[in-house]
């Protein structure tokens, strides 16, 4: 049990309507996602510390990706699976065409929203568990038990192939193609010093990649700092790299992640 669990965060006051008043919260991703989270934190009284810790680089095998996208545009796949908003960015950057005859499965509401914003569509979004496993659980019902579907599974270079393997075991023809690589981004010396000195009250952990960077660049995290993970898989990934997690979001969304921090702050006020 961490010191945070035993004694709470550092005794910060909780004001009406501003449950995170006085809190400094590390947001480990930039871009539209980071901006949205920062705004939501400010609305709850917190001071966001936006410090992107991961970025994305082109795949090492661009010919394979380009060939897969050409086949997709030609109607060579019945389904496309998209597991992150970053994959949507890759699709858009290549000007990828998804025919109306090809259905799209999105893991998570954020991914589905990114697809729509980019002019694509999402036919399946897991209703309960926004993860690869959640999509697998709902796949058969969503596809009326069809077998032998041709599926393009786009993924990051480090992603576990839970979805691809599961769909192949279910009797489908799956082409798993790497769409991008995840790379670490160094935070500023000031951010690192503030975290180590306990001047950051909470750290948001949104993926295994982020967990690895938090531990490598900022660890060990002070016991008085709350570490919040976006889901059970992220908590497992964090544990694998030696990063402690104090609370887990009920749903795999940014809003739920912030709610978990608010609940912890209120409980230990």
Image (tube, rainbow, N blue to C red):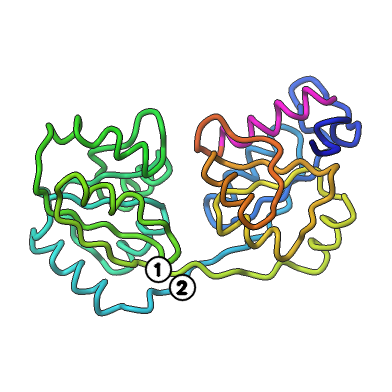
Magenta-drawn segment: 255-269
Percent position of residue 148, x then y? 9, 48
Is 76 rendered above or below residue 25? below
Residue 180's disc is 1
Is 250 rendered above or below residue 85? above
Residue 4's disc is none
Q: Would you say 63 lies left or right of 143 here?
A: right
Is 247 rendered above or below residue 186? above
Q: Would you say 178 lies left or right of 28 here?
A: left
Residue at the (38%, 74%) spot, across then down: 59
Which of disc 2 and disc 1 is earlier in sequence? 2
Residue at the (79%, 45%) spot, across then down: 24
Percent position of residue 201, x then y? 81, 43
Q: Which residue is labeled 2 in the image?
A: 57
Query: What element does badge 1 sit on?
Result: strand
Percent position of residue 264, x then y? 74, 29
Looking at the picture, tell me which residue is in the foreground, 48 or 3: 3
């Amino acid at each position: 049990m961490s010191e945070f669990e035993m004694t709470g965060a550092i005794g910060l006051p909780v004001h009406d309507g501003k449950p995170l008043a006085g809190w400094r919260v590390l947001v480990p991703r930039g871009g539209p996602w980071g901006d949205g989270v920062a705004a939501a934190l400010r609305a709850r009284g917190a001071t966001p510390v936006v410090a992107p810790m991961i970025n994305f680089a082109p795949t090492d095998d661009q010919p394979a990706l380009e060939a897969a996208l050409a086949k997709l545009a030609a109607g060579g796949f019945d389904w496309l699976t998209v597991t992150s908003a970053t994959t949507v960015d890759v699709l858009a950057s290549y000007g990828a065409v998804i025919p109306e005859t090809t259905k799209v499965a999105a893991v998570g509401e954020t991914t589905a929203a990114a697809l729509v914003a980019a002019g694509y569509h999402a036919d399946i979004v897991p209703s309960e568990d926004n993860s690869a496993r959640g999509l697998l659980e709902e796949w058969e019902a969503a596809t009326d038990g069809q077998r032998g579907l041709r599926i393009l599974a786009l993924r990051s270079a480090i992603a576990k192939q839970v979805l691809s393997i599961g769909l192949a075991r279910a009797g489908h023809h799956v082409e798993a193609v790497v769409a991008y690589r995840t790379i670490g981004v160094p935070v500023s010396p000031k951010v690192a010093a503030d975290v180590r000195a306990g001047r950051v009250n909470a750290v948001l952990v949104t993926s295994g990649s982020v967990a690895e960077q938090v531990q490598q660049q900022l660890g060990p995290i002070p016991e008085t700092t709350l570490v919040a993970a976006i889901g059970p898989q992220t908590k497992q990934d964090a544990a694998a790299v030696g990063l402690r997690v104090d609370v887990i979001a009920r749903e795999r969304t940014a809003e739920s992640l912030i709610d978990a921090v608010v609940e912890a702050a209120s409980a230990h006020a």
